Amino acid sequence: MTKKFLAGSSVEELKSWLTEQGESSFRAKQIADWLYGKLIFDPFQMKNIPAKLQNLLAENFFAPSCQIAERVESPRDGVVKLRLELHDQESVELVVIPSDERVTLCLSTQVGCPVGCRFCASGVNGLTRNLTAGEMLEEFLIGCREAGRKCDNIVFMGIGEGLVNSTELFKVLDILTSPDYYAMSPRRITVSTSGFVPGMLKFAELGKEFTLAISLHAPDDVTRAKIIPDKLRYPIKEILAAADVCRDRTGRLYTLEYTLLAGINDSPAQAEALGILAKSHRAKINLIPYNATDSEFRRPSREAIELFEKTASATGATVTRRVERGAKSAAACGQLRVNAEAKKKDKK
Ligand code: SAH
Ligand code: SF4
């Protein structure tokens, strides 16, 4: 029997499992209360559960299945980046970002990534496997524990292309927003995609007010092809049409994320084209100056970044720049995992 993840089990599922085990079904509510009310998912910390049942839970479920293998904290702004080791020794990353009164979690959706954008450390070795809903929920719970409380915002902007793993991701979205579970507002959850159109259309069907972010990186398909390999790259027109479907379904405007790469997508002409495109779709632009990894790309100069921002804004589009935080150590998405993988290979 394949083990299930305790984080993410519904009260109904727990009830039927308890009955199978000859245990009282009223315990289901108690277990769910630990999981979803108190954010505790280790059975041995569930104080009102008898020892025998705690042991049964630990034997039958992954609870917990992930361990914190590495922790990098930025003393300047309190951003904590965690590398989690999964039950099969693979790793993913989770970032806890405090700001003013709020805490945002940046979660991974896959081990590796099938899209393989040429500037991104997450996709260098392709996709290893999808994360299960239980694993993503454990990421969430570990992040909340790290922050010392339930988090305010979640962005699925860690390792992986979440909309390729939509079945598991949508279970997580449901559990996070359902009143019976974590009761989060969908508006506080952002799913970022490189523009995987079939997944975006399924996302639109959810019909809930989740926030969508599109990693566009170029105002035209020729430039985009220099950054994202053919395999999972869709034409910009199709991506924006799918994003418009999401917007019209939920009433939520979307964001175009744009990683600035020197000499590739950072010219004033590209800034203007991006601004015009964004305005025509009522989308916001979020600029992300490239965080150097082991790639062929470079980050533009400060002057080039400022000129790009000014030129795009001059079209009337709303332009923000991603606040750069925790940039000191391995800030680029997927970098901790890549370093850990390299060390594993050295040992072999
Ligand atoms: N796969 C999804 C979500 C994860 S990547 C997507 O691509 O949208 C989240 C964001 O981080 C993307 O916009 C991506 O462009 C950006 N990113 C990844 N590596 C980066 C780096 N080294 N420097 C700057 N931005 C990076
Ligand atoms: Fe995958 Fe997103 Fe990285 Fe591209 S930017 S390789 S889609 S994680």
Image: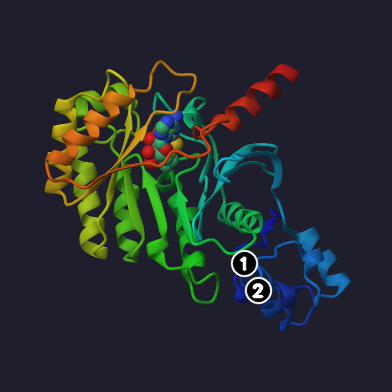
Mark-to-mark CA distance, 2 and 1 = 8 Å
Quarter holding the N terminus is: bottom right
Q: Earlier in the sequence, mark 2 or mark 1?
A: 1
SS of the residue at dot 2?
helix
Which residue shows up at 31% across the image and 20% down it? 262
Amino acid type, callout 2: Ala
Residue 348: tell me if it is visible. Answer: no
Which residue bears the numbered disc 2? 32
The secondary element bearing badge 1 is classed as loop
Vertical arrangement, residue 253 with respect to residue 194, above or below:
below
Res. 120 image quadrant: top left
Q: Position of residue 71 (x, y in %)?
A: 67, 40
Q: Residues within 10 Å of mark 1 (few under 14, many from 20)?
A: many
Q: Measuring 33% from the left and 27% from the top, which residue is drawn there?
A: 228
Direction from residue 38 to residue 333 in the image, left or right = left
Question: Horizontally, is 19 left or right of 307 in the view?
Answer: right
Residue 191 on image: x %, y %: 40, 51
Which residue does the numbered mark 1 point to in the structure image? 9
Q: Is residue 139 visible?
A: yes
View quadrant of ligand 1: top left
| 51 relative to 20 in the view: left or right | right
